[in-house]
Amino acid sequence: MAENVKELTRLLKESAVKITRLNNESKEESKVKADYEARLLATMDAIGTTTLKNEWGNFRKSVNTLPVAKDWEAIYEYVKENDAFYLLFKRLSSTAYKEMLEAGEVLPGAESYEKETISITKPT
């Protein structure tokens, strides 16, 4: 049984608009949170503590070491020479894969699937 197309398009558009609004709000709130976090970290450093406890929770300062790639060629060479592929994310680039397929190339160990989507543009 066919569903009401006009109603489905309205619901899809409303959902897309809501997701966009929530994503924008989330980005803005992430900036606010980052500011509060930076201020609290500075305060904790100033008073010489790594933990705080109060009615809103237990707050603990931690330090994480994160990588920043400066020379991808050197990194790739290291990964190949040391069989260190665990350092890389296991994800294929959709754009590069599509370009390979369009060029008639095959990527061993990969297969394709098609995902149907609907794009929404402003009414004309």
Image: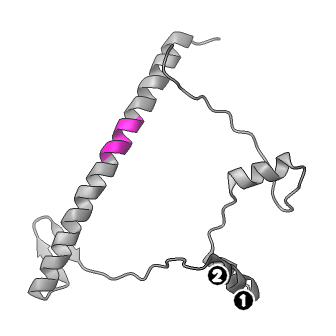
Residue 89 is left or right of residue 109, and the answer is left
Secondary element at tag 1: loop
| Alpha carbons under labels 2 and 1: distance apart | 11 Å
Residue 82 shows which numbered tag?
1
Q: Position of residue 89 (x, y in %)?
A: 62, 69
Give the main secondary structure of the magenta stretch.
Answer: helix
Q: Is residue 23 magenta?
A: yes
- Residue 107 in percent (x, y) is at 84, 59
Residue matched to label 2 = 75
Kind of residue at disc 1: Asn
Magenta residues, start to end: 19-25
Res. 110 image quadrant: bottom right
Q: Percent position (x, y) of residue 79?
A: 69, 83
Q: Write the residue at 53% across / 26% down.
A: 120
Residue at 87 percent of width and 49 percent of height:
103
Local packing at callout 2 (Cα closer than 10 Å; few below 14, some 14-19, many 20+) is some
Q: Is residue 74 above or below residue 13?
A: below
Provide the secondary structure element on which disc 2 rests: helix
- Height in image: 111 above or below 91? above
Q: Quadrant of the N terminus?
A: top right
Give 108 or 60, whichever is nearer the viewer: 108
Among the 4 quarters of the image, the one containing residue 24: top left
The residue positioned 33% from the left and 48% from the top of the image is 26
* Label pair 2/1, CB-CB below 8 angstroms: no
In front of the other: 4 or 115? 115
Vertical position of residue 60 compared to residue 109: above or below:
below
Q: Is residue 102 magenta?
A: no
**Label 1: how many residues lie within 10 Å, few (<14), some (14-19) or many (20+)?**
few
Amino acid carrying label 2: it is Ile
Which quadrant of the figure has residue 85?
A: bottom right
